Image (tube, helix red, strand yellow):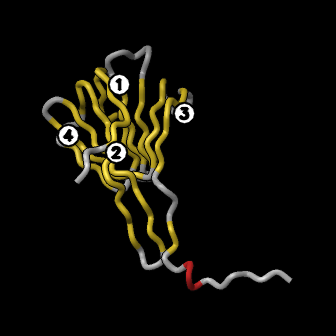
Amino acid sequence: MNQPEPLFSSSRAFRVWRYGVEHSELVLRTDDDPDEPVELLFEGVLSVHFDQLWFTGLVVGRAEDQILRSPTVDIPHLKVELGSAGHAAQVVCRSLTCIGGIHPDGKILWTVTAPRPKSRITADIPAVERA
């Protein structure tokens, strides 16, 4: 297995701020300087695995994408690995956004999104002919 592609690193302290099952969202937020917060917003969350809910210093990397398969469509998801001294976490999601400030009013610093879903039955759909 390949090493995760580095996306972000910070010496700041982050913690799990919010997890909303109904919207499939996870937010990690810095808690060391309330005047200059940074958030990591995970959207379309499929799974999470944490051994702790806080990180003193944080390294974020993108591992191999995971595919959710159904009979008709393949839906790629990002596999994001989070690390800090002594512990690690994984989040499988559709997108990850780094926000300077607090969502939704903060400034988007960067975003990474999984590839678009692919139909598994496109070959069976006839082409449309124009008259």
Q: Residues at badges 1 and 3 in contact (C-beta under 8 Å)?
A: no
Marks 3 and 2 sit apart, C-alpha to C-alpha, by 24 Å
Q: Residues at badges 4 and 2 in contact (C-beta under 8 Å)?
A: no
Per the image, the residue denoted by label 1 is: 30
Q: Residues at badges 4 and 1 in contact (C-beta under 8 Å)?
A: no
**Depth-wise, is mark 1 or mark 2 nearer the camera?**
2
**Depth-wise, is mark 3 or mark 2 nearer the camera?**
2
Looking at the picture, which amino acid does disc 3 mark? Pro
Marks 1 and 2 sit apart, C-alpha to C-alpha, by 20 Å
Per the image, the residue denoted by label 3 is: 104
Give the quadrant of residue 66.
Answer: bottom left
Per the image, the residue denoted by label 2 is: 62
10 Å crowding of disc 4: few (<14), some (14-19), many (20+): some
**Helix, strand or loop for disc 3:** loop
**Helix, strand or loop for disc 1:** strand
Give the quadrant of residue 82.
Answer: top left
**Depth-wise, is mark 3 or mark 4 nearer the camera?**
4
Per the image, the residue denoted by label 4 is: 88
Marks 4 and 2 sit apart, C-alpha to C-alpha, by 13 Å
**Depth-wise, is mark 4 or mark 1 nearer the camera?**
4
| Front-lying residue, 13 or 117 | 117
Position of residue 10 measured from the top left corner of the image (x, y, whole percent)? 32, 24
**Helix, strand or loop for disc 2:** strand
Position of residue 88 measured from the top left corner of the image (x, y, whole percent)? 20, 40
Looking at the picture, which amino acid does disc 4 mark? Ala
Q: Earlier in the sequence, mark 3 or mark 2?
A: 2
Marks 1 and 3 sit apart, C-alpha to C-alpha, by 16 Å
Looking at the picture, which amino acid does disc 2 mark? Arg
Q: Is residue 8 left or right of residue 131?
A: left
Marks 3 and 4 sit apart, C-alpha to C-alpha, by 27 Å
Q: Earlier in the sequence, mark 1 or mark 2?
A: 1
Position of residue 128 measured from the top left corner of the image (x, y, whole percent)? 73, 81
